């Protein structure tokens, strides 16, 4: 089989190579909640943005259940988390933030959600899509699972013109999908030099300090512990491929 024939093979994974992905012109990162993208791919997006990539963040839910403080109203929390997301995007050099404002904690995989993912992909036409790995074992959060499945199915829908023709948008096939929190990663991005941007973006989500960052917003000591844990995690992710700091993904060629 010739190289050109391999590239046309329906089983695209046969044509996989170990080569690093070039910096994309456009990237679309899709997270279930504000801060999910930063944990999964923040440094990679910062690296690409600095190299000229137009990065868009799409936040699926409104973040309205992301607190353990009973005195905080869901309405106020939604506004806070939206503002925090804008700050985090600026820290990473992200060009645009979009919100779908689905209710936090109540996201379900539906054809409507799949259709919306298709519409976003066809509209933004990203070279690379990044999101949650829906195949991750023991992923407890239903929003993460629903988002991951909708993204993957939306990618498939977006590439074929017979899906949702009423959208009036031309089909689009991304070069790759990168899924974070994968059990079996096979793609690594070197984030040396971009770790600090990831941390700065995460710390913009101060409303989540207690729930996801060990109270990093409360004291310098807590912040130092959080940063140390994140640094150790990044080092661990990079060890299989000899990187001092990395973000790892499952790569799928759609």
Image (cartoon, rainbow, N blue to C red):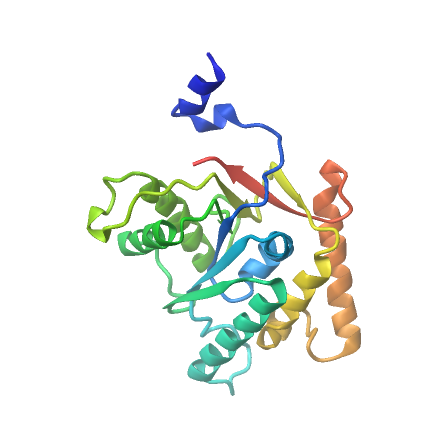
Residue 142 x %, y %: 44, 58
State the residue in front, 236 or 142. Answer: 236
- Work out whether 187 lies above or below 146: above
> Quarter of the image holding residue 10?
top left
Count the numbered circles shown: 0
Residue 171 x %, y %: 31, 43
The quadrant in which the C terminus is found is: top left
Task: Please name the residue shown 48% across and 58% down the image.
Answer: 56
- Work out whether 180 lies above or below 202: above
State the residue in front, 125 or 246. Answer: 125
Residue placed furthest toward the front: 52
Task: Please name the residue shown 27% across and 49% down the image.
Answer: 169
Residue placed furthest toward the bottom: 71
| 147 lies left or right of 213 | left
- Work out whether 197 lies above or below 204: above
Task: Please name the residue shown 63% across and 67% down the image.
Answer: 91
Residue 246 x %, y %: 69, 48
> Quarter of the image holding residue 200?
bottom right
Residue 229 x %, y %: 74, 60
Task: Please name the residue shown 52% across and 56% down the image.
Answer: 55
State the residue in front, 212 or 56. Answer: 56
Residue placed furthest toward the top: 1
State the residue in front, 186 or 165. Answer: 165
């Amino acid at each position: 089989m010739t190289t050109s024939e391999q590239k046309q093979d329906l089983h695209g994974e046969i044509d996989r190579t170990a080569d690093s992905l070039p910096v994309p012109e456009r990237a679309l990162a899709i997270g279930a909640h504000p801060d999910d993208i930063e944990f999964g791919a923040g440094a990679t997006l910062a690296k690409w943005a600095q190299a000229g990539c137009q990065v868009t963040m799409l936040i699926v839910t409104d973040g309205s259940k992301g607190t353990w403080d009973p005195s905080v109203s869901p309405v106020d929390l939604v506004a806070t988390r939206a503002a925090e997301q804008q700050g985090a995007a600026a820290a990473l050099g992200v060009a645009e933030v979009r919100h779908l404002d689905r209710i936090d904690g109540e996201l379900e995989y539906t054809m409507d959600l799949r259709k919306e993912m298709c519409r976003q992909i066809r509209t933004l036409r990203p070279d690379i899509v990044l999101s949650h790995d829906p195949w991750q074992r023991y992923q407890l959060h239903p929003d993460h699972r629903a988002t991951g499945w909708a993204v993957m199915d939306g990618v498939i829908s977006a590439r074929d013109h017979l899906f949702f023709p009423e959208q009036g948008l031309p089909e689009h096939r991304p070069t790759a999908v990168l899924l974070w929190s994968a059990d079996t990663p096979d793609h690594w991005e070197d984030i040396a030099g971009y770790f600090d941007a990831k941390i700065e973006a995460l710390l913009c989500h101060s409303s989540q300090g207690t729930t996801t960052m060990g109270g990093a917003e409360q004291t310098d000591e807590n912040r130092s512990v959080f940063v140390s844990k994140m640094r150790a995690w990044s080092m661990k992710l990079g060890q299989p491929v000899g990187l001092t700091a990395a973000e790892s993904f499952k790569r799928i060629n759609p």
